[in-house]
Amino acid sequence: GAGVSQSPSNKVTEKGKDVELRCDPISGHTALYWYRQSLGQGLEFLIYFQGNSAPDKSGLPSDRFSAERTGGSVSTLTIQRTQQEDSAVYLCASSLPGFHNEQFFGPGTRLTVL
Amino acid sequence: QQQVKQSPQSLIVQKGGISIINCAYENTAFDYFPWYQQFPGKGPALLIAIRPDVSEKKEGRFTISFNKSAKQFSLHIMDSQPGDSATYFCAASWNAGNMLTFGGGTRLMVKP
């Protein structure tokens, strides 16, 4: 079956612009996660959605970052007024409900802020 | 605050050798420790995972060793192959939240 898909695969934007990154999780996966991978660094947790529960936003680095999940499926990560330090690969993952289920990652969106 | 520390940052191993990557964690609430493998341009993929009620788990050429008292765990890749060349990440999570806390990654190169 189809895995996690993300779009666009690459995004180049100018400092100060807003960007939207999209994630389509695996069908039936009610848990969805966003992570950020800076160049040569590990992955940093951003936000976690589980079903209809309020999302865990504890990893968002500033109020310029927000995310929503519509209909319990597709998610959009929005970065407002982008800064150069926002340049990174943004990864989305999904999993079945419950604890410690395997997280399946998408290929990521590479964001470059000029 | 880096809660999971991973070493080495890079590793070169000859084909057929043993690759060893180490991780140490701080949060004693962690109760799930997966390892992820990432190839260039791809998202990470789960390789093997362990829970703290066992000290070792083996799947094929991959083994996790876990030392709860030392708060350390390691990945051993036996008979390393060029196709194993990738970046490896250790991670940890706990029941209060499913999000993964990742180590900084190890870039492994297996020379033929």
Image: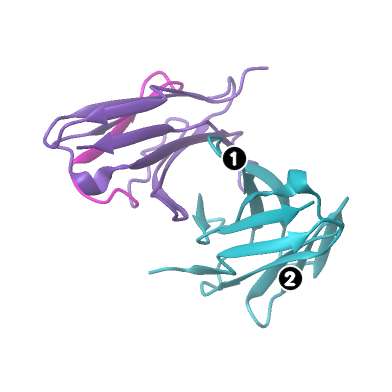
> What residue is rendered at 18% in x and 38% in y?
A82
Secondary structure of the residue carrying tag 1 is: loop
Residue B46 on the magenta span: no
Residue B86 at least partly seen: yes
Residue B34 at least partly seen: no
Where's residue B34, x and y in %?
66, 54
Seen in the picture, residue A75 relative to A85 is either above or below; the reply is above
Q: Which residues are magenta?
A: A59-77
> What residue is rendered at 46% in x and 35% in y?
A92
> What residue is rendered at 59% in x and 40% in y?
A103
Secondary structure of the residue carrying tag 2 is: strand
Amino acid type shown at disc 2: Phe
The chain carrying label 1 is A
Give the spatial CA distance, label 2 vs label 1. 21 Å
Amino acid type shown at disc 1: Gln
Task: From the image, tell me which residue sits under label 2.
Answer: B66
Task: From the image, tell me which residue sits under label 1.
Answer: A103
The chain carrying label 2 is B
How was the colour assigned to the protein in this rendering?
Answer: by chain
Chain painted purple? A
Q: Which mark is residue A80?
A: none
Chain painted cyan? B
